Structures are given as C-alpha cells and as structure tokens.
Amino acid sequence: MQTSLYPVISWTTLTVRPEMTVAEAMQAMADREIDHLFVVNADDQFLGIVTDHSLLKAELTGRATESTVEEWMSRRPETLTTEDTIGDAVKLCRDASLSRVPVLRDGRLLGVVHRRSLVQWMVTHRVDASASNIAPHHVTTRELIPC
C-alpha cells in the first residue's frame, strides 16, 4: 500500500498551548464535542496530545483550575510525516492501537490521520497493494484555542 497519506489526512486540527489549564481544555473539548487536543508551543512546534481521558484523571485530583495541559499531555506520541504512506498509517494504528495519529512536517503539526478515515479509504478503494500515489489537494485549517 504505497499510496500517499494525503487522501486520508484531516487538515482541520485544534491546538492549545501547554500553559492552558485543564479546566479550559476540558471546556474547549466540550464546546467542540471532541476528545483530544494537540499541544504546540509558541514557535508552533508539536509537543504532544491531551485527551479527554487524561483530563478526566486530572479533574479527579481536584486541581483542574490550577493544573496545566503540559502536566497531563502525552509527550512524544507516535506520529507520521508526509513521507509516510497509508500502509504505514494502517500498520501504526494497528500495532499501537491508536485511533488518531498526528502528521508532522519539520516538527510542526500539519494534520491528523484518524483510524476511521483509513477504514473508509480501504473500503472505498478495496486496497490494491500496488496503488499509485495520489496527488495532494488540500486546504489546511487549524484553530488555536486561546487560554
């Protein structure tokens, strides 16, 4: 499966800064009905991911208004690059039991590949191992949620 990742990348991502409080991050997730946020620094370098599961654990400490995302995020999660293929993404999601994988370029968040997008692509294309690369046609959208 040598097909480029581009057809399955979601170009819309939500990012937060590491200094955002747990309470603010939980509110951002609730408002947008999502279960994760990507964490980037002021230079837009990817730092990690924070999930609803991590934030619920933080909430149970009773310090949600004082604790920061940085304290609860997963650092150095598995990632993909634009050089990877759909086959690489499928293998990574399968082997690491991941539902989403950030896609980076030069250390910066470009997008995300969701396991459900991989499944949809495989069903639609009936996965031909010799499939050719598909040219990228995309628009990147990213929203930084302010503290």
Image: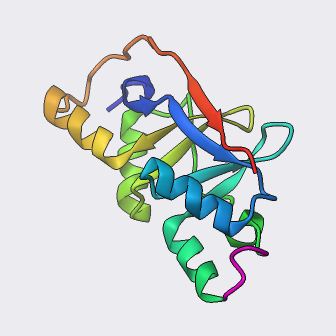
- The picture quadrant where one finds residue 6 is top left
* Observer able to see residue 74: no
**Count of numbered badges drawn on the protein:** 0
Principal secondary structure, stretch drawn in magenta: loop
| Rendering coords of residue 63 (x, y %) | 72, 82
* Observer able to see residue 147: yes
Q: Is residue 135 above or below residue 70?
A: above
**Which residue is drawn at the image coordinates 74% and 38% (left, top)?**
107
**Which residue is drawn at the image coordinates 60% and 80% (left, top)?**
59
Q: Quadrant of the N terminus?
A: top left
**Which residue is drawn at the image coordinates 73% and 73% (left, top)?**
65
- Say left or right for 89 vs 23: left
On whether residue 65 falls in the magenta region, the answer is: yes
Q: Is residue 27 above or below residue 129?
A: below
User: For this rendering, which residue is in front, 109 or 53?
Assistant: 53
| Rendering coords of residue 146 (x, y %) | 73, 44
Residue farthest to the bottom, as pictured: 61
User: For this rendering, which residue is in front, 9 or 15?
Assistant: 15
On whether residue 11 falls in the magenta region, the answer is: no
Residue range of the region highlighted in magenta in the rendering: 62-66
| Rendering coords of residue 83 (x, y %) | 55, 29
- The picture quadrant where one finds residue 46 is top right
| Rendering coords of residue 57 (x, y %) | 57, 82
User: For this rendering, which residue is in front, 29 or 41?
Assistant: 29
- Say left or right for 82 vs 96: right
